Amino acid sequence: MAAESARRLATGRPARLSDVLLTPSNALRIADELSRLRGAAMKIGQLISMEAGDFVPAELAEILSRLRDSATHMPPHQLRATLDREWGRSWLSNFQRFDPRPIAAASIGQVHRAIDRQGRELAIKVQYPGVRESIDSDVDNVASLLSISGLLPRDSDIRPFLDEAKRQLREEADYLAEAERLERFGRLLANDPSFVTPELIPELTTSRVLTMSYVSGLPIETLASASQSTRNAVMSRLISLVFRELFDFRFMQTDPNFANFRYDESSGRIVLLDFGAARDLSPDLCERYRHLISAARNSDRLLMRETALEIGLVSEGFFAANADRIHQAFDVVSEPLRRAGAYDFGTSDIPDRMRDLGMDFDMRDLLSQAPPPDAAFIHRKFGGIFLLARTLKARVDVDGTVARFCANTASDPAPLTPAKC
């Protein structure tokens, strides 16, 4: 940054802090460093690249997209030392083959393929040493980066967001908790031929090593070149699953990273991976969302306003000052729910229109409207599934898919309390 500032000053150009930080070369360095640090730092970089691409400088968003699945691998001696601690020094005797080269490496851990003595093909997720202990400092450091980059207003208070990020990352770093969620999802979908989840191998699972059956599949993005009917069918099933999670299971996998979905060509099943971010949802909150979606389908602005206030998506004062724009934003994002027949995600301009509407709001006001954490994660899942549908250029009858979930909307759900949010 200092070198870039000097170059600009020498040519008589102004040198704003955000400009010299976000040069393409510096953004590349940021991405490389976050990839090397892994952990929470890389996780936040992934979130920026996936979910805020339209609202951050193009150079940063494009280069940080490198972080989606490109963490720096553990060197072999570190991997062996980690498994020695978790499994004991004789762990290699449990396997016919253990591939030391990871098949995937992400923010919290890396995944290895192996075959055990019983001939089972396994996927073994090994947590990076020190990741759990570095969560607080990593989140704080990346928050400092966002602050000095000028991406956030100087007087904005993002502490509630940071606290929630730290809490979620601590949960994701507990592989025993993830193992329980994996088994739970497996039970919920056991009779559904559309999906498959890995089988937990409990005897080889610890708080820092998660061992599962290996389930083959193509990256979900590769379906962009599949037939239109295949793309439509896959996205119809995934969209239906989101609403089943919200209304039937009341238990949602809230991380919509594309890497968490794969496609098994031989069976036509969708492979679901990574349940570290799965969370229970309160019945009251789910019922509020049933009302909100009913309001969207029927263009009922009064019900939308009441429900959005009850959930905590906006405050009374913010709504009163911005009612017209909030109604416009609601109409835009709920467009797929009001379209009769198939909605064409490939031609949708919803993100562009939402970006334009967002520019009309003061960023400080938006940041003051932080929704309850559960609501934020629900919207994160909705947004990620929308992006996947747009990537695949799918055409899905969203209203028809959602209709059965709103057929029995209760007329007066119980009041929400802060504790339940």
Image (cartoon, rainbow, N blue to C red):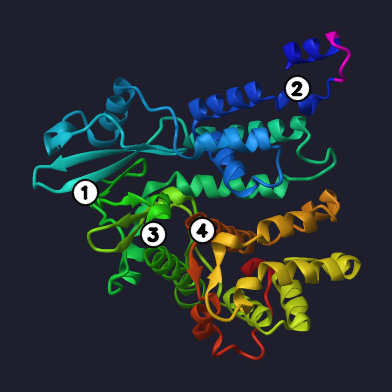
- Identity of the amino acid at label 3? Arg
Question: Looking at the image, is mark 4 or mark 3 nearer the viewer?
Answer: 4
Q: CA distance from mark 3 to mark 1?
A: 16 Å
- Identity of the amino acid at label 4? Thr
Give me the disc on residue 203.
1
Q: Is residue 399 above or below residue 113?
A: below
Which segment is the magenta one? Answer: 10-14
Give me the disc on residue 181.
3
Answer with left or right where residue 233 lies relative to residue 88.
right
Q: Which residue is mark 2?
A: 20
Crowd around label 3: few <14 · some 14–19 · many ≥20 (10 Å): many
Residue 244 part of the magenta segment: no
The picture places residue 327, in percent across and down from the top left corner, at: 79, 72
Give me the disc on residue 148.
none
The picture places residue 191, in percent across and down from the top left corner, at: 28, 74
SS under mark 4:
loop
Question: Looking at the image, is mark 3 or mark 1 nearer the viewer?
Answer: 3
Answer with left or right where residue 365 lies relative to residue 35.
right
Query: Does label 4 or label 3 sit earlier along the sequence?
Result: 3
Whether pointer 3 and pointer 1 mark residues with C-beta atoms closer than 8 Å, the reply is no
Seen at 26% across and 45% down, the residue is: 123
Crowd around label 1: few <14 · some 14–19 · many ≥20 (10 Å): few
Q: Is residue 93 visible?
A: yes
